[in-house]
Each structure stands twice: as C-alpha cells, then as structure tokens.
Image (cartoon, rainbow, N blue to C red):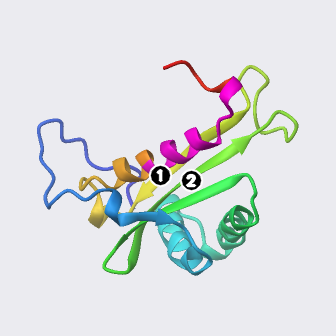
Amino acid sequence: MSLYADYQPDGRASEARLGAECVRVARTEDVDAITRISAERDGHHPDEIRHRIAGEIGGMQAGGSWCVFVAEIDGAVVGYGRIRDLTHAEGGLPTTLPEGWYLTGVVVAPAFRRRGLGAALTEARIDLSLIHISEPTRPPL
C-alpha cells in the first residue's frame, strides 16, 4: 500500500466526496479493521500492532489519553485517525512543545482516497481536541 495518495494538483475526486457522516469514534470491534489498514500501509505484521491499537481504543474508553476515529462506508472501516494528549512527564513530548492534544496521524485505504475522508477525519479530530483544551490554554481566535 502506498503511504500517500497520488499527487494530482488538478485532479478531481474519482467518486463523490464523503464527509462527516462517515466518521465516528472507534469502538473495540474496530480493532481488526484498523489493524489491517495500518499493517497494509506500514508493512507490519498485524500481530505486531494489534495490541497497541486495542490499547489505544481501550484507553480511550477508560478516559485515557487517546481518541481514535474511523471512517466507515457501508459498514466497513476504510480509514482511521487518532489524537493523543501528550505530556512532558511521559517522555513522548519534547519540552520545547506545549502539552496538550496532538493529531497523530490519519490513514485511508487506497481505494477510498481522494473522496474527502481524510479531511473529515481531521475535522473530527480537531473538533474533539478543541473541546479538551481548557480555557486558560485555549489559543486566541
């Protein structure tokens, strides 16, 4: 699987554009689909990443620091995106960056690219991350 959609500066989507109606928060039953899409894109064996993905979704459901969204068409998960609440204490965030919610990636299966799903996943992730920003740290509009 290609890491990115083909560059088409003047191209149009091959099919109708899709949007927010296809995006929802991931559930435990989405782990296998997300694992498949991720493994195909990154070249990993599914067994190497299934546990991490299950942990992200499980942690989210327990109020943890991850939130995973999926894009779904006709009952099938065809893409996903994540946000994560990063802190300096956990060591995953350089001290030069502010703590808070970060977009951590979006992947859409090749057959469904260039249809607006990446944009819809990004909008959902941004909307949720802004909800979690406390008023004193909210960026100025």
Rendered residue at 12%/47% (across/down): 12
Q: Position of residue 90 (x, y in %)?
A: 85, 42
The image shows residue 45, relative to residue 67, as above or below, that is below
Q: Nearer the viewer, residue 141 or 92?
A: 141
Rendered residue at 52%/59% (across/down): 42
The image shows residue 84, relative to residue 111, as above or below, that is above
Q: Amino acid at mark 2?
A: Arg
Q: Position of residue 37 (x, y in %)?
A: 47, 68
Q: Nearer the viewer, residue 63 or 10?
A: 63
C-alpha distance separating marks 1 and 2: 7 Å
Instruction: Say whether residue 51 is magenta.
Output: no
* Neighbour tally class for label 1: few under 14, some 14-19, many 20 plus, Cα within 10 Å: many
| Magenta span main SS | helix
Q: Secondary structure at mark 1?
A: strand
Left or right of residue 27: residue 48? right
The answer to which image quadrant residue 60 occupies is: bottom right
Q: Amino acid at mark 1?
A: Val
The image shows residue 33, relative to residue 38, as above or below, that is below
Q: Which residue is mark 1?
A: 106
The dot on residue 126 is none
Q: Which residue is mark 2?
A: 82
Rendered residue at 76%/27% (across/down): 94
Instruction: Say whether residue 131 is magenta.
Output: yes
The reply to whether callout 1 and callout 2 are in contact (CB within 8 Å) is yes
Q: Secondary structure at mark 2?
A: strand
Q: Which of the two labelled residues, at mark 1 and mark 2, occupies the earlier sequence position?
A: 2
- The range drawn in magenta is 124-136
Q: Position of residue 46 (x, y in %)?
A: 60, 74
Q: Position of residue 5 (x, y in %)?
A: 30, 50
Rendered residue at 25%/59% (across/down): 18
